[in-house]
Amino acid sequence: GGDPSSKRNYLLEEATSTLSTLARLPWGSRVQYGTLGSKDGTKVNPPMHLQIFEFEACPFCRRVREAMTELDLSAEIYPCPKGSVRHREMVRRLGGKEQFPFLVDPNTGTSLYESGDIVKYLFHQYGQGRNPSTGLLESTILTGWMPTLLRAGRGMTFWERSRKEPPPKKLELFSYENNPYARIVREALCELELPYILNNIGEGSTRERSLIKLSGGKEVPYLVDPNTGTQIGDYKKIISYLFQTYSLDAL
């Protein structure tokens, strides 16, 4: 992928990300079974955010993010790119080994490795015991690697000119897993090792109204940075903002 902060060929970026989306249809695009969480259709969010340690280019991490879109779950994302200066050490400390994805659920005191186990746990705990959508678990072996290959390693490696300390407040990203433009933004957040709150908003999400109220529309990605008061909805502007704001050169 080269230097992620350098000038990009956005036609190529969009083409490869769109092909990645096509490779993963229909997973990670919509909320499964309508609104999950309670039998009367009222969304019940966990009191505390789930914590996911992962990196964007990992196909097994992708499986977990797809499940979270289907379940309409938000989470705190702790990107763990290769060369990580913070979050990989946190995983070793919390779980005992450096393996991804890694889930911490402070609501139940649960910590889990292995993407298949995490997905089954999420559906059991937050999907009324329903099963993941057909093929979600099995599809990773067949097409799960395609976005990684098509995106040429984007969202895999820590950018060497990233700040070494995280911002005081977590950024927020409205996204859903299989959106081609949101994927490019999540890759950048990973390369910068910026922790953020992922507000999943697949088709049928209960968060759609909140996004419309915040941004005036329902398009994703939409970034909110409480550290600077910035809100941006265009993925190209988000990329530019992130690498300008959170590079060592900006200090």
Image (cartoon, helix red, strand yellow):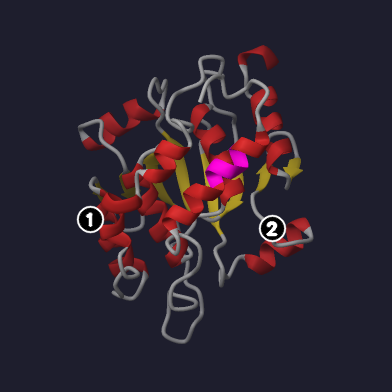
Residue 53 at what x, y percent from top left? 37, 40
Is residue 248 visible to the viewer in this orientation of the structure?
Answer: yes
Residue 203 at x, y percent in the picture: 56, 68
Q: Kindly identify which residue carries mark 1.
A: 117
Q: Element under label 1?
A: helix
Q: How many marks?
A: 2
Mark 2 residue type: Glu
Task: Give how far apart the Cα atoms at labels 2 and 1 are.
Answer: 32 Å
Q: Which numbered circle lies on residue 219?
A: 2
Mark 2 against mark 1, which lies toward the viewer?
A: 2
Q: Going by the picture, which residue comes out furthest to the left?
A: 96
Q: In front here: 154 or 227? A: 154
Q: 149 above or below 137? A: above
Q: Is 193 left or right of 97, judged from the image as shown?
A: right
**Label 2 or label 1, whichever comes before in sequence order:** 1
The amino acid type of the residue labelled 1 equals: Asp
At horizontal 43% and vertical 78% (from top left) the residue drawn is: 33
For residue 132, which quarter of the picture?
A: bottom left
Kindly give the residue lying farthest to the bottom in the view shown.
Answer: 40
